Image (cartoon, grey):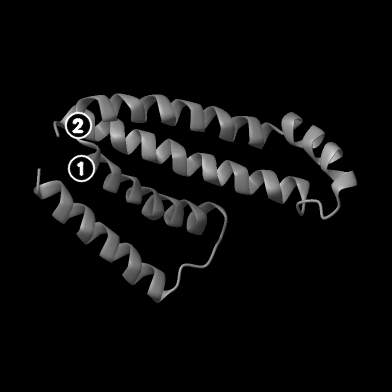
Amino acid sequence: MNLLTFMLAVISVTLNALAQIALRKTMQTLGEFPQSASDYLYFGYQLILNAWFITGMCLYAISIGLWMAVLGKTEVSLAYPLLSIGYIITAFIGYFFLHENVNLLRIIGLITICIGIIIISRSA
């Protein structure tokens, strides 16, 4: 995998992670998901007008476009494991911007993911 393809993959995964954060902010804005069927329509109306939701969906769309470019240039067995970078990015964003807890076990898990990414990327 060349550097440009790798960078496209990282940007795609980062946009995907940011989309997850936007969806989290959506739910913080709207509150809990409705429990009754009668509330779904109103919730859906609120959802499609929510700026965080719209942002998240746009980020997903761009991410998918970039990911398709990556898949057009490299083997899926090499590209797909790079998606796990999203776990690392999401953990950092969640910690710094959403003030979510990142304990020692999560840190160990993230380090393990990094090691796996390095091993797989060296196999190319």
User: Residue sitting at 86 percent across and 38 percent down?
Assistant: 42
Q: Is residue 20 above or below residue 115?
A: above
Q: What type is the residue that disc 2 sits on?
A: Thr
The residue indicated by pointer 2 is 74
Image quarter in which the C terminus is found: top left
Q: Is residue 29 above or below residue 109?
A: above
Image quarter in which the N terminus is found: top left
User: Residue sitting at 19 percent across and 31 percent down?
Assistant: 74
Side of 10 relative to 22 (left or right): left
Q: Nearer the viewer, residue 22 or 120?
A: 120
User: Residue sitting at 49 percent across and 27 percent down?
Assistant: 61
Q: Is residue 10 above or below residue 4?
A: below
Residue 94: x and y in percent read 51, 55
Residue 8: x and y in percent read 29, 30
The residue indicated by pointer 1 is 78
Residues packed near mark 1 inside 10 Å, few (<14), some (14 to 19) or many (20 plus): some
Q: Is residue 29 above or below residue 102?
A: above
Residue 40: x and y in percent read 82, 43
Q: Nearer the viewer, residue 40 or 7?
A: 40
User: Residue sitting at 31 percent across and 38 percent down?
Assistant: 10
